[in-house]
Amino acid sequence: NAGVTQTPKFQVLKTGQSMTLQCAQDMNHNSMYWYRQDPGMGLRLIYYSASEGTTDKGEVPNGYNVSRLNKREFSLRLESAAPSQTSVYFCASSEYGTTYEQYFGPGTRLTVT
Amino acid sequence: SQQGEEDPQALSIQEGENATMNCSYKTSINNLQWYRQNSGRGLVHLILIRSNEREKHSGRLRVTLDTSKKSSSLLITASRAADTASYFCATDPGGGSNYKLTFGKGTLLTVNP
């Protein structure tokens, strides 16, 4: 099992460009999450999907959109990138209610110039 | 806003010594989890303690929870150089906020050989 995979691993964007970060999990988990991690800030939740067909805002959703494409895949879109979105982005999944821990992908390091 | 706050922010010890990290949080929880993050990697779940538990062990890890003080501690015994990583606590509020973990800013542990 690959667990949680993310693409791309690295990306450099210019201000105003758009891009989609892809995430997939092969553990048949219902819940999926997108976080951003900035130095000294820990992880902050951007959006989450409790189950297929639902998405909800987290702590820092502004400037982002998400799509839960199916049970496996959860993508994060930046429509018009800003330097403040320079960060490391992590996708995670969990089977809430059965076990509670989250499984994380390796991250995408995004730089917006 | 951050729910959990780890203390200290950074800790440097010698191999073989014990490492203790603390986490304080503000609101009631369903469970509290500890994660490890090696440099440049995603987070890995270490241990979960439920609100009705006071202590839990897993290998060289010991976690305590004091809900009256809203605090938890993670003890790593007989530390090894491979334990060098950042450690995060994450709180699960349960109830209507199911699925969402709130992470602290982390403790950077350095174990010197």
Image (cartoon, coloured by chain):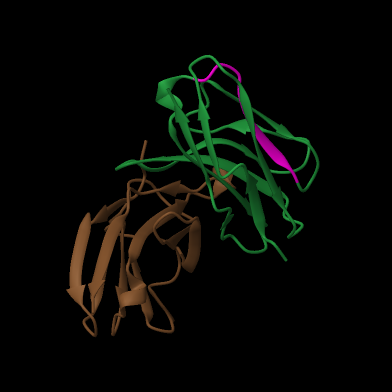
Chain colours: A green, B brown
Is residue A74 located in the magenta-colored stretch of the structure? yes
**Residue drawn where x is 50% and y is 30% of the image:** A12
Q: Nearer the viewer, residue B12 or A51?
A: B12
In the image, residue B81 above or below residue A64: below
**Residue at left offset 77%, top offset 41%:** A52
Left or right of B48 on screen, residue A104? right
Q: Position of residue B51 (x, y in %)?
A: 45, 63
Magenta stretch encompasses residue A15? no
User: Is residue B9 visible in the rendered structure shown here?
Assistant: yes
Q: Which residues are magenta?
A: A73-81
**Could you say which quadrant of the image residue B81 lies in?**
bottom left
- Residue visible at 35% across and 73% down in the picture: B83
Q: Position of residue B107 (x, y in %)?
A: 28, 57
Closest to the observer: B5 or A6?
A: A6
User: Is residue B22 in sight in this rendering?
Assistant: no
Judging depth in this view, the residue of B56 and A32 nearest the camera is A32
Percent across and percent down for residue B62 are: 36, 77
Would you say A101 lies left or right of A5 here? left
